[in-house]
Image (cartoon, grey):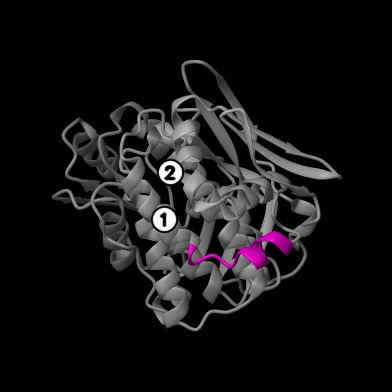
Amino acid sequence: MPKVSVIIPVYNVEKYLRECLDSVINQTLSDIEIIIIDDGGKDNCPQIIDEYAQKDERIIAIHKPNGGYGQTCNVGLERATGEYIAIVEPDDYIDSKMYEDLYNLAIKFNSDIVKSCFYDNLQAKEEQRILKTKWADDKIPQDRSFTVNECGLFLQYHPSIWSCIYKREFLEKHHIRFVEAPGAGWTDNPFQVQTMCLAERINYTPNAYYYWRRLNKDASDDLKDYTLPFKRSDEIHKWLEANNIKGDEIYSNLYTREMAYISIVLGKRHFKEIDDALVLVNGLLNKIDKNLLRTTKNVRPAAKKINELIFSSPMKYRRKIISKKIKQNLISIRWNKREKRVILFGKTVLKGKANE
């Protein structure tokens, strides 16, 4: 049995694929299985995959019709035989010691999940940089296993499912698979929530190994279908209810990320479906316990301000707030120790004491 099965779902990324594959085959942990799935690509990726498969017997090449990111990852999960499972996206690359270090940590603690920090590799036209992601390392246990009910911060952050390794036995026990939807479909979100909520032993290292490539600085610009965050959120809440998942630590952090979903959607630069979006925004807001979101210590101050703005503003202003944010971004928020004030169209629409 290989120590780690590495799943690489590939679709039309020939520009970056060789760099990705080289970083995986050159891991210092050599006892790995590399499953590369061509999701019906129309560029030279199928040929590149076959070329690498001929050179390295650890590589399993699979070619199939296009089915989307989630379905492609599921094909890899069904084929994997390793003790642990990892996912690498084909336009990213990893440090040579990633799987050796994560696997050793997993064996030490018998972990269901081992998660590491990662690098944000921004390659936008207006800015290029590589920065280590800043997480609240002082709040995340690093010398012992924990559950998401003890530390739910990962549910607040980017899913980054590829900066982890997962025990295959754990995934099989709970029948965890990806949502299958066209394209990328934000299907990493339900997978992350399910794995984190069901894991009994999570371990974390602040060391960064994974280089996550971003070609656009603004997340809203990458969102072609604004309904996706709301669809995935609805699936997550249904799953949480069906599996009787409880705990303020889980929900407070999840709510914070869902507020970010709303910000991403409303931040789209070319957005005409304001009324349709309002229906989805209100549907998501109805799932959120606003009192829990207000009082939790984990919520960032900026998120609390957005929360107060959305929940406290009368409904008749909500459409104006969204419309103005999209068109001109003319919203003034004053927030200090003594007062809170929201000014819209030059008119104060929300005012009160800061502790109200």
The residue carrying mark 1 is 188
Q: On the rendered structure, is 150 left or right of 162? A: right
Amino acid on which the number 2 mark rests in the picture: Ile
Q: On the rendered structure, is 258 left or right of 54? A: right
Give the dominant element type of the magenta stretch: helix, strand or loop. Answer: helix
Q: Quadrant of residue 75?
A: bottom left
Image coordinates for residue 251, horizontal then vertical, percent:
59, 68
The residue carrying mark 2 is 25
Q: Is residue 287 magenta?
A: yes
Magenta residue span:
286-295
Q: Does residue 289 appear in this view?
A: yes
Q: In this view, which residue lies farthest toward the left?
A: 65
- The residue positioned 58% from the left and 55% from the top of the image is 311
Q: Earlier in the sequence, mark 2 or mark 1?
A: 2
- The residue positioned 31% from the left and 34% from the top of the image is 272
Amino acid on which the number 1 mark rests in the picture: Asp
Q: Quadrant of residue 268?
A: top left
Q: On the rendered structure, is 285 left or right of 180? A: right
Instruction: State the CA–CA distance, disc 2 to disc 1.
Output: 24 Å
